Amino acid sequence: MTHPNQSTTATDATNPGVRWYTVDADEAGQRLDNFLLAQLKGVPKSMIYRIVRKGEVRINKKRCKPDQRLAAGDEIRIPPVRVAAKQSLPNPKLEKVAELEGCILYEDDIMLVVNKPSGTAVHGGSGLSFGLIEGLRALRPQAKFLELVHRLDRDTSGVLLVAKKRSALRALHEQLRDKQMEKIYLALVYGSWPGKIKSVDAPLQKNTLQSGERVVRVADTGKPSLTKFRVRERFPQSEINATLVEASPITGRTHQIRVHAQCVGHPIAGDTKYGIRGFDEQLQVLGLNRLFLHAQSLTIQHPKTGEPLRFEAPLDPNLQAVINKLRNS
């Protein structure tokens, strides 16, 4: 059975592995190499360039270049490509895929919103065989396009946007660039957060240690980074000195909220990279077993209708239990 956009021709009848794909309006404008990477999952980029260079890929039966932009109605010849098993996308575990169904907060024809669990990477790679996007693709095999609009750290939970159409991805990326998305995170931080600290404006720079570990530091040579903070709740009755704060990142740098909280002396609970061991040990006694950073809400304009939408993800039971114990201790 062929995809609605796929067909075969008499020319390729003797080579049934060849596919012809008709580009629709939503796919127009992208580069040929990016299109092929999406179509030929797991195929190395070097192989993509090789089959294009050898003329095995054709656009409207003509030779083409990797950077050629596609137009609606273009017919693309896609040859069969053999990929070593280790390069193929892994088959996500069925139970993990099934669990993701219960994490979907919203879905329509152009996007879906997920409450990402802590401990799940947004995509596979770097030794991880399973990521949220791979799981969603297994959960929605009929969807020909599923791409992350933005990312969350592996240990961060909460609202995550996924586009089901390229046009939706472009529109949502535009909202991100124009700072039209409002993101609110909840974080439990060390100490009594000063009410006078309403924002942290500190440039951030990514560094890679000799071990290969990636860390982010405040540095004058880093990229401009701004996070707004607001105290949500204090726990004066608790022996553990902690504050629940809201964090709204205006820019979207790697580890931004975590490093901005650390640089003003109030690192996030359970942060093994930027946190305080003694503080984390106190909270482990209360049952905290993860980073206490949760993307609680996200406000956007619907890419198709322009309607303002706000999505909220409840705290997972572990985080809520820790808050309850701080209130009652």
Image: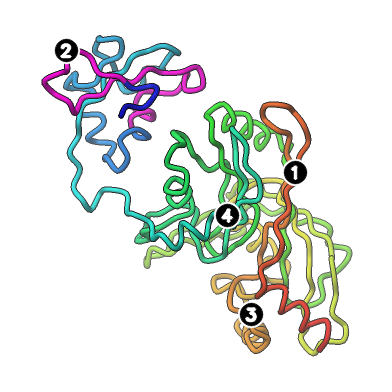
The answer for how far apart the CA atoms under marks 2 and 3 are is 62 Å
Q: Which residue is mark 2?
A: 11
Give SS at disc 2.
Answer: helix
N-terminal label among 2 and 3: 2
The answer for how far apart the CA atoms under marks 2 and 4 are is 46 Å
| Disc 1: CA contacts within 10 A as few (<14), some (14-19) or many (>=20) | some
The answer for how far apart the CA atoms under marks 2 and 1 are is 50 Å
The answer for how far apart the CA atoms under marks 3 and 1 are is 28 Å
Q: Is residue 30 magenta?
A: yes
User: Magenta segment range?
Assistant: 7-36
Q: Amino acid at mark 4?
A: Leu
Q: Is residue 62 left or right of residue 260?
A: left
Which residue sits furthest front? 1
N-terminal label among 3 and 4: 4
Q: Is residue 198 magenta?
A: no
Q: Which residue is mark 4?
A: 152
The answer for how far apart the CA atoms under marks 4 and 1 are is 16 Å
Give SS at disc 3.
Answer: loop
